[in-house]
Image: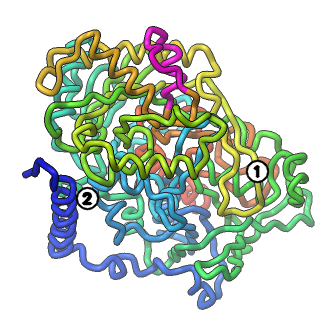
Amino acid sequence: MAVVGPLSVIFNLLLSLLVSHLHFTILTQAGEGRWEDKYPFIREASTFSSFSDSYDYIIVGGGTAGCPLAATLSTKFRVLLVERGGVPFTNANVSFMQNFHISLADTSSTSASQFFVSTDGVFNSRARILGGGTCINAGFYTRAGPSYIEKAGWDSKLVNESYPWVEKQIVQRPNLAPWQEAVRESLLEIGISPFNGFTYDHIYGTKVGGTIFDHFGRRHSAAELLASANPNKLDVLVHATVQKIDFDTSGKKPRAVGVIFKDENGKEHKAFLSTRKGSEIIVSSGAIGSPHILMLSGIGPKAELEKLNITVVLDNKFVGQGMSDNPLNTIFVPTNRPVEQSLIQTVGITKKGVYIEASSGFGQSGDSISCHHGVASAEIGQLSTIPPKQRTVEAIEAYRRSKKNIPHEAFRGGFILEKIALPLSRGNISLVTTNPDDNPSITFNYFSHPRDLKRCVNGIRIVEKIAKSKHFTNFTQCNKETLDRLLNMSVQANVNLIPKHTHNTESLEQFCKDTVITIWHYHGGCQVGKVIAPNHKVLGVHRLRVIDGSTFKESPGTNPQATVMMMGRYMGVKILRERLGKAAGL
């Protein structure tokens, strides 16, 4: 039921909160119980003083790769997992799909989502919670294609064992929403075929993928993969912010010996790595966090480290380089009535180097209207009255507040999204301060490669065809005149801080540049052959690996979370087999 009228915003928001509470109660009564009982090894970082032993593995970052990696390694060895954020289990913004946009809009210091703006002027977020990006993403689950696995040099047999290990624990088949059905039929109508049905596989055509949201709309993140751990061999510390990795530099090569972190009270601690052969520190802090931590620890471009008086442990000019983000452009299609909320469920995998996806209904609550995060913000209005150089954080906040006066009806509708599959544009990360809590300077150089821009134009033309297809007449009539208005509305929306060229929809190239946003699939910074070896060991250093999306040259499949979680499990099994042989039993 949805109420329409002056009290609709307040009523519907209260209704959604009530439903969230009921869902949580139902799930608890169904046997989930208290999270502390299920995960007794998760503790606040300030309790670390009670631990005295060294660890066989210290994993820095309890995210998409770090959680399955820790669970796997703990089956045989003593593992410490340190995570700078808190737990996701009691966070309603994380737990429920209907609050997806609220988590991204929360820019407070305790948010699960750490807001940043790239130097390109694009709003973005990085996870700050146990479970990592799986706690703040749109939930879509799909595997990488066989060619990606082959190019990565991975053992396909082990890959095909590792994906199901994830899937049986946290992945669901979605109930397809009406907006998703319309997109599916429209994709097929315009020739993005065949229809491959429901599948995790990466296949040309149109398909429905998996989701980490269950039928109650509750999220199941990578943190829940920790349930597969040996509770007697795993310690997980939350609110543990790593300051740096500690090295013994007395030998020919630096040797990682421990990790220095601060707890939630600001007190500093040091966790020691065991001296046993094979023990390692593994950095799994994500595409931004991992190169950032390496540089703060003294591994990176010498000149840059010396500028901030960081002792150089290893000069490597490639740390933080090769960063890439899959640029996203989207059209908001207003409707004449509310539409059911949905995140990514249907995807069109084209042969033109773009993917087509969709979302709906997230512009219909008072909280949505206050949100300014690109695809999650159905914003009608603009910052064009403020000169680009004056578009400060304060100006953005003032704009966000003013949007509350916009009529609620202006936010009804859904998005049709197109994103570049394999962008060729590259950027980098560089240090701004030595404070681990501060974001580094991040540049993606969107559309700096002409082929990326050409693909975007192809994608927008596909979106235009979808918006005008007969299957969207159930939601809105969209002729050429209407479509031009939609394009201009997208240009004017406050989706980034890039100077706008309104009323210029004749140039789709300019439209792509003006309306570029992120879909949070950034990767690179610690790439194979430049920062790490194929076995993920950091070049030039003993007892240190990097395992996460920072090692990717390309983002896997249409959406990376499945492959990043798989990689955590895969590398955990590989490490155990290398160290134990047949005794690994895996």
Estimate the x, y position of residue 24 in percent, counting from the top left. Answer: 21, 69
The spot of residue 401 in percent (x, y) is 42, 52
Residue topped by disc 1? 431
Number of the label disc, if any, that sits on residue 13: none
Residue shown at 56% from the left, 34% from the top: 325
* Residue 583 seen in the current view: no
Vertical position of residue 147 compared to residue 104: above or below: above
**Mark 2 crowdedness (10 Å alpha carbons): few <14, some 14-19, many ≥20:** some
Left or right for 225, reference 120:
left
Q: Relative to 285, is 202 on the left or the right? A: left
Residue 513 shows up from this direction: yes
Q: Disc 2 residue type?
A: Arg
Element under disc 1: loop
* Residue that appears at 20% across and 15% down: 469
Q: Which quadrant of the structure image shows residue 336?
A: top left
Task: Give SS at disc 2.
Answer: loop
Q: Position of residue 50 (x, y in %)?
A: 59, 91
Packing grade of label 1 (10 A; few <14, some 14-19, many >=20) is: many
User: 559 or 341, which is in the foreground?
Assistant: 341
> What range is drawn magenta here?
500-516
Using residue 524 as the reference point, say whether residue 227 is left or right of it. Answer: left
Q: Which residue is mark 2?
A: 218
Residue 300 on the magenta segment: no
